[in-house]
Amino acid sequence: MAQPTYRESSEESAIAPLPMAHLSIEIGHFSLDEILDETDRIRAEFRRAVPLVRAFTESARVEFGPEARVSTCYLMDDYFQTGHEPGKVLDRLLGVAADAGLSLDYLARESGCHETPLFTAGVPLGEPIPVAEMVAARLIAQPEDEETANGGRPPTAESGWLCNGRRERIGRSRAAMHRETYSPPQEHGRREHSIFLDVELWHDRDPERRWSCPFLAAVWQLLRLGMLRYHGAAVVEPQQWATGREWPGSWQDLPPVVRLNENAAPFTAYRTMSMLPKRYLPIEHAVRVILDHLAIDDDVADFVARQGFAERVDVPDKVVERVGHLLLEGS
């Protein structure tokens, strides 16, 4: 599959400003089957999250002042599970959250991290934005190693695999009776020992490219951090969903990001915190590797940094340093 090329947004048009919260808190991530079939467990998890949200909110106020802006969000798994009716799932999820005393400001669709239409007043316009391809085009190529140089392993843009170091090497001696030489994998920036990770970003075994969960989760972080633009414009703009309004019959008819609380702080934020079940540890490790290997648009990065400076918010240069995780036991 040919890799598209995306130009710097500043070459196309001015960068649109986005409203920024100080902190975006993601609360949980469950499959659609779990939402429908394990209501009691999810209610218990949400109840446990309520005091944690209060604690992170208070921490933000200590750091940024009493007027710190904090929003909450939940990402729906509609990319890997498409066979469930949105209304049934969303009513169950929001009902469980209300029972637990948990307020969700925004709902987002994971398929919106793949591609998303431009919405105006809740109406999709034109061709969808290829969000995942935009991000993939900004992956920093791995340093050439022996396997890549001799054609034994395709580069990341072709293979869909990304690692955080140098892969293992097995030398092949032509001399009889000689053992093959072996070099173990090595992590870039390691201290004494390596923690090596090789991440599958996508595969092309299906008619269309299939993006991996870690890659879409990395895109999700970039969307929450306000780090993506398309011809200078915002990639997603949350659409207000009126209370009592009927959910659409198809996930694709639901805006990529829905605002449930009209008084919510902005969806995009200078920092993110994801409170997730502990089984997501490997995925979030992979997310951090991916974010660490992206060439972020310099103009967007400078724009967000200036926004933060004007509000006396320190915005780390490395995007991965703006991302936090809390992995919960028992999930």
Image (tube, helix red, strand yellow):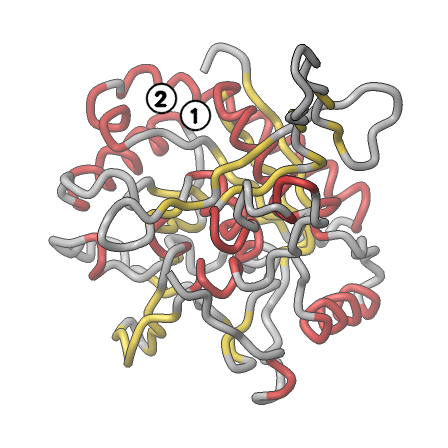
> Viewer-proximal residue, 175 or 257?
175
Task: Measuring from the top left, give residue 318's x and y in whole percent.
Answer: 76, 52
Q: Which residue is mark 1?
A: 46
Residue 147 percent coordinates (x, y): 62, 40
Q: Residue at x 11, y 53 (%)?
A: 249
Circle 2 is placed at which residue position? 43
**10 Å crowding of disc 1: few (<14), some (14-19), many (20+):** many
Crowdedness near tag 2: few (<14), some (14–19) or many (≥20) residues, C-alpha within 10 Å: many
Q: Is residue 140 above or below residue 82?
A: below
The correct choice, above or below, for 114 with respect to 329 in the image is below
Quadrant holding the N terminus = bottom left
Give the Cα distance between marks 2 and 1: 5 Å
Dot 2 falls on a residue whose secondary structure is helix
Give me the residue at 53% from left, 75% from top.
Answer: 6
Where residue 139 appears, as percent x and y from the top left, is 60, 56
Q: Which mark is residue 20?
A: none
| Label 1: which secondary element | helix
Extreme right residue here? 191
Q: Quadrant of residue 130?
A: bottom left
Q: What is the total number of numbered labels drawn onto the structure image?
A: 2
The residue nearer to you, when weighing 242 against 323, is 323
Label 2 close to label 1 by CB (< 8 Å): yes
